[in-house]
Amino acid sequence: MIHFDVFNGDADGICALHQLRLATPVESVLITGVKRDVALLQRVPALAGDRVTVLDISAATNRAALVALLDRGVRVDYFDHHFAGNLPVHPGLRATIDPSPRVCTGILVDRHLGGKQRAWALVAAFGDNLGAEAAALAVPLALDAAALACLRELGESLAYNAYGDTEADLIVHPATLYRTLRPYADPFEFIAAEPILRRIDEARRDDLSRAMASNPSFALEHARVYVLPDAAWSRRVRGVFGNHRANERPALAHAILSPNAHGGYTVSVRAPLARPAGADALCREFATGGGRTSAAGIDDLPPEAVPDFMRRLERAFG
């Protein structure tokens, strides 16, 4: 039997997998990629009797590949907080899916494990911009403010590393990052010991400093739209920059656009933190859109569709 671990390359996917494997160590084949590379199940060459664990990727996006795996006799454990669509009913599938705006996959795994690897669930939540939820989870751990700040920085750095249109945009490949993190049960030991994290953090701070100097390209009544330049740093920083602007102006929605290799734009959308819902529904109105209810995106928005996107953005959050 071969075990495959299939996971989103961001903080949530990595930390969700880390919690599971700390609790139940398994030698597995890792399948992951940049944050937007979510059609991952089609890469899994599993056969009858094999097992697949899926973390933090949409079942709706991967439904055909999921059904094919199940039909081949593969057992699948699925943890996710994105829109799932019509989930197949099959004895080989165990699904833990909750698209509520105040959970992430790391929180779902934390519930599954009864809090046994809670510190890593905090990192996952911080990485998904769920600061209040992370703070609530942290209460039984009795962490001081400095310790919580360290976990927040770790989550934000892991999340940042997954952003980019291709693996060439990333500082570290997510599979390499997970393998580096895997020996550490204690996130504070990982923070202290691994230079790879400092490398990511330095790049994140530099990229974010560039982005924060940007003014809104379009100031709508209920949203702000930023169009960043065509550069690797802008492709990496979209999500983190969107989170920062959302935290600054919680009553507004935010959209971050950067040019892509197809001549269009890749888009990150953040629903207002005061009303964190509707981002996925908006993005699914476009052919390459998807995500979760509070944060979603569009892989390829044609330039001529930008005015229509802004009208729909304003309508969705007005």
Image: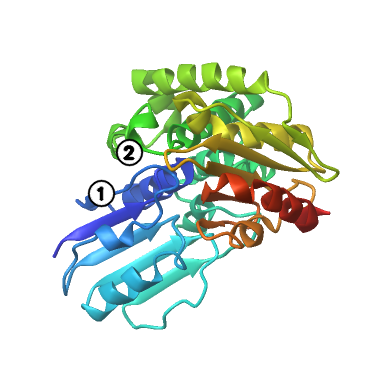
- The relative height of residue 272 versus residue 147 in the rendered view (above or below) is below
Task: Judge by depth and name the residue closer to the eye, 219 or 211.
Answer: 219
Give the side of residue 291 with respect to residue 179, left or right: right
Quadrant in which the C terminus appears: bottom right
User: In the rendered structure, which disc, 2 or 1, sits on the residue that comes first in sequence?
Assistant: 1
Q: Are marks 2 and 1 in contact (CB under 8 Å)?
A: yes
Whether residue 206 can be seen here: yes
Q: Amino acid at mark 1?
A: Leu
Alpha-carbon span between mark 2 and mark 1 = 9 Å
Within 10 angstroms of label 2, few (less than 14), some, or many (20 or more) residues? many
- The relative height of residue 11 versus residue 1 in the rendered view (above or below) is above
Residue at 36% from the left image edge and 83% from the top image edge: 90
The image position of residue 26, as x and y in percent, is 23, 53
Q: Secondary structure at mark 1?
A: strand
The image position of residue 151, as x and y in percent, is 54, 31
Q: Report the colour scheme.
A: rainbow
Residue, far front: 304
Q: Secondary structure at mark 2?
A: helix
Query: Which residue is identified by label 2?
Result: 178
Residue at 21% from the left image edge and 59% from the top image edge: 3
Residue 30 image label: 1
Within 10 angstroms of label 1, few (less than 14), some, or many (20 or more) residues? some
